[in-house]
Image (cartoon, rainbow, N blue to C red):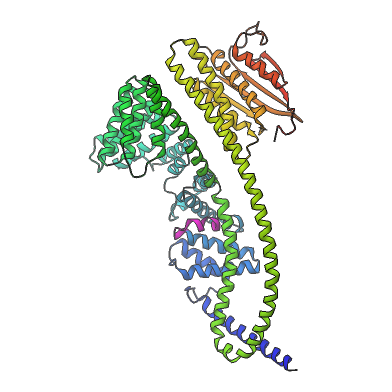
């Protein structure tokens, strides 16, 4: 009977405390937000807050953030997707206005995905803010996913977009930062036709616009157009008295020099580079000065002024600037290796060649890490948003517990005896649960330790395999570098030709080992990606103008192991090289097509064709005396493949092969 009365008393006390706490929380929840009297519903409050945030009429403070987080927590607990989406929209705008872009991105993305019946204005605002947020944290690869839709929405109603505060003021500049140069040029032209850019009434802005337009053309490899607009900017600056006009003029001349280099007009680029170097020194910009000296030395190499090239390159090594750009020293090391080779100082050339190879690996790894980090920003932020929602639930529970403790302090004093009894009972239960949890924890720890040991062993083996491929690649590159140095030193054209051919074959094998140690799965080569890099490597080695001869890849996503990839890579290297050398006499233009597809099961076909002069009528690959084609014939036998060839709008080679090993392909 006594226990029944105690139980009834505890339930009554708890009920009273719950009612008092609910009334207290309900009274204080909205006290910090100055809602109009006629707005009482939750959706109405959220719509009103959104308008205030967009127009910057509501102070961004902790009370507003707490109100929105409480609403979000309520939506999560009550499983109300509409309330959650609208609250995320407001919370994302709040974080964006406070420049907390890391928190703004996932909440704005959540609103974009989940708010039903988005209006044009809402879509425009969301795409604008998400694009700016990703650009502000330099996650350019993620920003690319949104900028196309943003441009479409802007063109739909440019007047409404102009009313948005914190909008993208220079869409062409954004495309330029995202390396989308053709789009940057297109947007700039549209703005010029609309009378927004290159307005003659403002000479300084006119010069800046012309300079930017020149940069877009230069980045897109349109040197003639770039020089035209650089000349316009130069003429305005030289005839005006702008503040810091000297540095601006030097910057224009430096960019003009880069355009002349694209046209291989090195004599015209050299004086402009010297003026840019002096202008950079005057304003204390040592990084710009060092980059300019590297480019100046490159031009002097091309014009035969080797002594001055060496002097300028060594001057860069003596410079010290606050934040050294590894690319400056990287480029400087390459040019020093080439310059010492031209001066027949092979020991120094070899030393800088090894240093350049080491720096190549380091910079490539750093770029891969940055690229991977940018590509994963959006996914990571969404994951953090989910974790934050769970944390909000836990934080809300803790806040409720603290507030209830404050409100119920006087009742706890009067009911201390009853609570003490309940507390003792809870301790007994907790102790029993603690023992069970400790046993489970010990089992989990033991399992985790075994898992960690297995993973550690696997990582060590994978690291050793990557290190082997890395060293093989480095050794092949050293051999390639030695052949290059020897070719420079050799005067016999035939021997030099043989060395260059051997160097290209070694590079094709080195590229496979490089991709193996850079891939997450070191067993297989992504052959489509390999063919892209190999074709660019061959075009560069043979100094082919990509505008005259193009390589077109029609390749499926296929993965081969090293036993198949190396002979296939050598075959492609030989056939493309032969096509470039013999299919297009003099300055003829054309296209080389590479087809690779899975016919059925493990059967594959590789087709390499050109639209050049074709094969001689008496051509027979089995009796040819050409080393390259003999190598192709030998490698085809190694792959147990069928090789055929014919004249069809040019030369066409077809290789049909079947993978022998089941583990050969992914």
Compare residues 559 and 106 and report the one nearer the observer.
559
Horizontal arrangement in the rendering, residue 419 relative to residue 126 (left or right): right
- Location of residue 393 with respect to 366 vertically, above or below: below
Residue at x 54%, y 15% (from the top left corner): 581
- Location of residue 420 with respect to 366 vertically, above or below: below
x and y percent of residue 319 in the render? 31, 37
- The main secondary structure of the magenta stretch is helix
Residue at x 54%, y 60% (from the top left corner): 89
Q: In which quarter of the image is residue 188?
A: top left
**Magenta-highlighted residues:** 96-109
Q: Quadrant of residue 623?
A: top right
x and y percent of residue 387 in the render? 59, 61
x and y percent of residue 493 in the render? 47, 10
Horizontal arrangement in the rendering, residue 432 relative to residue 529 (left or right): right
Horizontal arrangement in the rendering, residue 142 relative to residue 211 (left or right): right
Horizontal arrangement in the rendering, residue 185 relative to residue 287 (left or right): right
């Amino acid at each position: 009977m006594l226990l029944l009365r105690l139980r009834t008393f505890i339930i009554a006390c708890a009920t009273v405390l719950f009612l008092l706490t609910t009334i207290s929380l309900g009274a204080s929840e909205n006290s910090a937000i100055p809602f109009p009297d006629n707005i009482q519903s939750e959706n109405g409050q959220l719509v009103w807050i959104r308008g205030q945030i967009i127009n910057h009429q509501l102070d961004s403070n902790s009370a507003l953030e707490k109100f929105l987080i409480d609403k979000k927590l309520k939506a999560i607990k009550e499983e109300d997707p509409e309330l959650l989406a609208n609250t995320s929209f407001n919370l994302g705008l709040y974080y964006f206005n406070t420049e907390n872009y890391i928190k703004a991105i996932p909440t704005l993305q959540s609103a974009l995905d989940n708010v039903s019946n988005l209006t044009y204005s809402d879509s425009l605002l969301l795409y604008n803010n998400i694009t700016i947020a990703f650009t502000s944290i330099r996650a350019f690869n993620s920003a690319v996913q949104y900028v196309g839709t943003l441009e479409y929405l802007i063109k739909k109603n440019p007047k409404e977009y102009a009313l948005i505060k914190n909008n993208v003021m220079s869409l062409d500049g954004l495309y330029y930062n995202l390396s989308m140069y053709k789009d940057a040029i297109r947007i700039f032209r549209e703005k010029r036709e609309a009378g927004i850019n290159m307005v003659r009434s403002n000479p300084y802005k006119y010069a800046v616009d012309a300079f930017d337009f020149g940069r877009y053309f230069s980045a897109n490899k349109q040197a003639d157009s770039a020089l035209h607009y650089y000349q316009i900017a130069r003429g305005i600056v030289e005839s005006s008295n702008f503040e810091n006009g000297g540095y601006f003029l030097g910057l224009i001349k430096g960019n003009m020099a880069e355009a002349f280099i694209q046209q291989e007009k090195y004599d015209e680029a050299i004086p402009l580079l010297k003026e840019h170097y002096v202008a950079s020194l005057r304003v204390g910009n040592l990084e710009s000065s060092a980059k300019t000296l590297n480019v100046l030395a490159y031009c002097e190499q091309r014009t035969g002024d080797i002594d001055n090239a060496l002097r300028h390159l060594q001057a860069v090594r003596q410079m010290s600037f606050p934040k050294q750009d590894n690319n400056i020293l990287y480029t400087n090391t390459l040019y020093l290796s080439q310059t010492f080779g031209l001066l027949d100082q092979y020991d120094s050339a070899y030393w800088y060649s090894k240093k350049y190879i080491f720096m190549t690996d380091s910079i490539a790894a750093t770029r891969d890490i940055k690229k991977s980090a940018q590509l994963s920003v959006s996914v990571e932020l969404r994951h953090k948003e989910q974790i934050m929602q769970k944390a909000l639930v836990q934080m809300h529970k803790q806040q409720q517990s603290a507030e209830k403790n404050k409100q119920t302090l006087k009742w706890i004093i009067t009911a201390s005896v009853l609570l003490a009894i309940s507390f003792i009972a809870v301790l007994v239960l907790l102790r029993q649960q603690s023992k069970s949890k400790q046993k489970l924890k010990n089992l989990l720890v033991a399992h985790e330790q075994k898992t960690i040991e297995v993973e550690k062993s696997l990582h060590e083996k994978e690291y050793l395999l990557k290190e082997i491929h890395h060293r093989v690649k480095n050794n092949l590159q050293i051999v390639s570098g030695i052949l290059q140095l020897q070719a420079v030193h050799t005067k016999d054209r035939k021997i030099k030709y043989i060395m260059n051919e051997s160097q290209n074959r070694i590079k094709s094998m080195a590229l496979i080992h490089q991709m193996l140690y850079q891939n997450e799965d070191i067993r297989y080569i992504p052959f489509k990606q390999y063919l892209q890099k190999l074709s660019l490597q061959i075009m560069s080695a043979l100094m082919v103008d990509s505008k005259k001869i193009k390589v077109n890849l029609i390749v499926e996503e296929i993965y081969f192991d090293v036993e198949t990839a190396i002979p296939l890579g050598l075959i492609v290297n030989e056939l493309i090289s032969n096509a470039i050398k013999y299919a297009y006499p003099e300055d003829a233009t054309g296209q080389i097509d590479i087809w690779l597809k899975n016919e059925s099961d493990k059967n594959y076909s590789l087709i390499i064709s050109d639209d050049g002069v074709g094969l001689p009528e008496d051509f027979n690959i089995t009796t040819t005396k050409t080393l390259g084609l003999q190598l192709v014939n030998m490698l085809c036998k190694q792959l147990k493949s069928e090789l055929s060839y014919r004249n069809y709008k040019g030369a066409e080679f077809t290789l049909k092969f079947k993978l022998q090993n089941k583990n050969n392909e992914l």
